[in-house]
Image (cartoon, grey):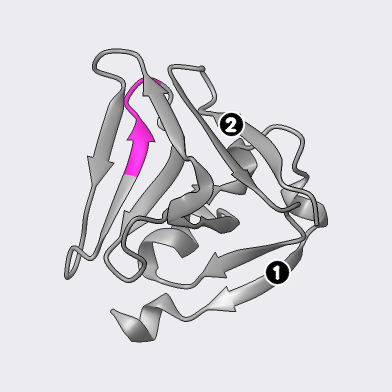
Amino acid sequence: MAIQLFKGSCHCGAISFSFEGEPVTKGVRCNCSFCSRRGTLLHLVPPDSQFKMEAKEGALGMYQFGPKRAKHYFCRNCGNHTFAETTRQPGSRIVNLGCVTGVDSAALETVLFDGKTLL
């Protein structure tokens, strides 16, 4: 499959990101208490994907809970969750597919990740 450039942002545009990867054909739905309340569809971006992020000064917020294995990043202006980092996949990012331009997260196959049990 051809590698393509994906771009995304929060709702207000204060945080933007990009990464390279194969076409997105499915998304991951995590059932941990945080992800299930947000209802986001996620995609793992590996370390070699050239992930780049830009944020206006003061816009990038970070939230951790429980064992603090993940860093969940969000926009302090609009509240939109954009991406996360986790110690389970060092160097990788987990992006919110709802923030990625040109990806219809509602049309993707969904895979369940049992984050509830793993915490």
* Whole-number angstrom distance, CA of label 1 to CA of label 2: 20 Å
Residue 118 visible to the viewer: yes
Circle 1: is it few (<14), some (14-19), or many (20+) Cα within 10 Å?
some
Q: Which mark is residue 110?
A: 1
Q: Which mark is residue 8?
A: 2
Image point 51% across, 28% down: which residue? 10
Identified by mark 2, the residue type is: Gly
Does the stretch in magenta take in 29? no
Quadrant of the rendering where the N terminus is positioned: bottom right
Q: Nearer the viewer, residue 23 or 58?
A: 23
Image point 30% across, 28% down: which residue? 60
> SS for tag 2?
strand
Look at discs 1 and 2 and give the one toward the viewer.
2
* Magenta stretch, residue numbers: 73-77
Vertical order, 59 against 109 (above or below):
above
Q: Nearer the viewer, residue 85 or 117?
A: 85
